[in-house]
Image: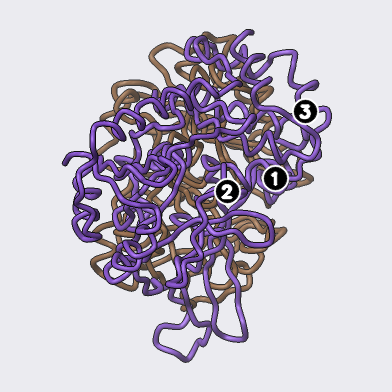
Chain colours: A purple, B brown
Amino acid sequence: MSDKIIKKEELTNILKALKETYEVIAPVKENGFYSFKPFKDGGNIDLNFTNTRLSPKSLLFPQSERIFEFNLDEKSKDGYIVKEHPKDYPPSVIVGIRPCDAKAFKLVNINFDNPEFKDPWWVKRMEAMTFIGLGCNEPSSTCFCTSVGCGPFNEESLDVMLFDLEEYFLVRALTEKGEKLLKQGRVDKDVDEGLQKKADELRIKAEKKISSSVPTDKLKEKKINDLFNAPFWDDVAFACINCGTCTFLCPTCWCFDIQDEVTKTVGDRIRNWDSCMFPLFTLHASGHNPRPEKVQRVRQRFMHKLNYYVDKYNTGVACVGCGRCVKYCPVNVDIREVFSLMNGL
Amino acid sequence: MADNPYLPYPVKIQQIITETEDKNLKTFKLVFLNKEDEERFTFIPGQFCEISIAGQGEIPIGIASSPTEKGFLMFTVNKTGVVTRFIHNMKEENIIGIRGPLGNWYPWEKMEEKNVVVIGGGFAFTTLRASIVYMLHPENRNKFKDITVVYGARSPGLLLYREEIAEWEKRDDINVHITVDATDDPNWPYNIGFVPTVTEQKITTSEDSYALVCGPPIMIKFTQPVLEKVGFTPEQIIMSLEMRMKCGIGICGRCNIGDKYVCKDGPVFSLAQLNELPKEY
């Protein structure tokens, strides 16, 4: 499919048309911050953002989710039997996702959908989702996507890419899923050469605007124990207060907990986001804890992203350079510095 | 595994056996509620399950029965946390769940045609019991050369599976060395001494051997040099680890040692494998 063109003001009507078939999710500004929310007919979509504060990971992996249900009535035929909770997986579109956040889904997918085990909820949501990306004309000063295998117009994890050309969007279908969606939205006007050229220039210009970069070239050859026992961890962890903000915001942090909650005789098994920053994360029932100290937990987070993940899956680092952890860390722990330390060891 | 790997199979508690005199260890014999679940559940000694109790949560516990024992699964549970305390107060006929089998197993193919030394301490004898029962089964016994067991607890009343071990004692196709740290029983017929000491006395060669070692960290710490002294290489020393777990299938992210998940890549590791990993367990 050749690239298409739409006028910006047409977008809302296209999304309204898509809403007949899809759940449409788009960036919305609320209380001064952007996040991904269901698109409303009134047009709450607002694409004037750099990155949303929270990553969109909760769309596939909710922060808290009922996975099973049960009743604790011993007289009931199915008392104490844990059962699946019926769920819908409607076809969905996320509009305006940044290429880095889309790439994060691809990186995390390796964990939830692997040859041995499939996480059913993640897999079904992933299948139902179509990703319409929005290239970044103005990357933020904390963005370093180009040095971790991504970029402001990286297409690898998207179904459709939008190029913001002031009055127009250039619309590029990248997969069959994307083509189907554009047909459904009746996006069919071919782009002219001038705007096509403008889009290419935009991409090159945006890549040049990424001012910050991290070194990754030597990470693959590093030995696990050399990095684990490196002398710099105390310094890296010194200011950290283990608040977990980084893991909460990070689009590639996927760790979770499973808890049961009961009201009288009915209950749910619930899956919640968890964080390796918390001591309870690894505490054994016996009282033993393999990571009792802050420095061990900080090391775990960076080792996982820049060493364990790299060695295990051979698809590069588990970081897309979105810069959220850099921007929102209350004590200015900067993953870019840790890249340099680990790569330079 | 079930189609949804998080969904437990419903099982019934058929029998509860109090194992130790302090009553902190009980063995639960479980039977499947559904025939098709039972047929689907095939395992190898060394694997574990998540025992799942509605309203309480889940705990990873080694399978203490052998696949050669049909019709039930056996788990020996130490009373420690929320779920284990709850299950200790449950009754026969109560319904719980299990997920599994999970994790890897002892290296049975490598151990064929070899001597097998089994060293256990305290309540870490569950998957070792499964392994011994498995090896002693008439179909399997001639696959292995000598089988030697060193098993110790703090006192006679804290040994697991006592009657069964006494039966093994009488057999001539297995060498069993039971020991206790101390006892005031003047007629105690077995050894007195720590597991590493008894290991040193009884295990005098590493030739053609594998050692399966499970026990508290202090026992492992002092047993390892004893084994190394008689020539066991790190490849010949096999251990099973514990770790806090949730999913049991390598997804939830908490039980890692370096790039390995204890739930999926373990719980069984050779000392050679562990030597390559960070000391964070």
Q: Which residue is mark 2?
A: A52
Q: Which residue is mark 1?
A: A245
Q: Chain of mark 3?
A: A
Residue at 53% in and 11% down:
A222
Snapshot quadrant of residue A124: bottom left
Mark 2 or mark 3, which is nearer the start of the sequence?
A: 2
In the rendered structure, which amino acid carries the disc numbered 1? Thr
Describe the element under mark 3 as helix, strand or loop. Answer: helix
Above or below: residue A269 compared with residue A177: below
The residue closer to the viewer here, A32 or A5, is A5
Above or below: residue B111 compared with residue B152: above
Above or below: residue B196 compared with residue B71: above
Q: Quadrant of the N terminus of chain B?
A: bottom left
The residue closer to the viewer here, B85 or A325, is A325
Describe the element under mark 2 as helix, strand or loop. Answer: loop
The residue closer to the viewer here, B41 or A4, is A4
Q: Which residue is mark 3?
A: A237
In the rendered structure, which amino acid carries the disc numbered 2? Thr
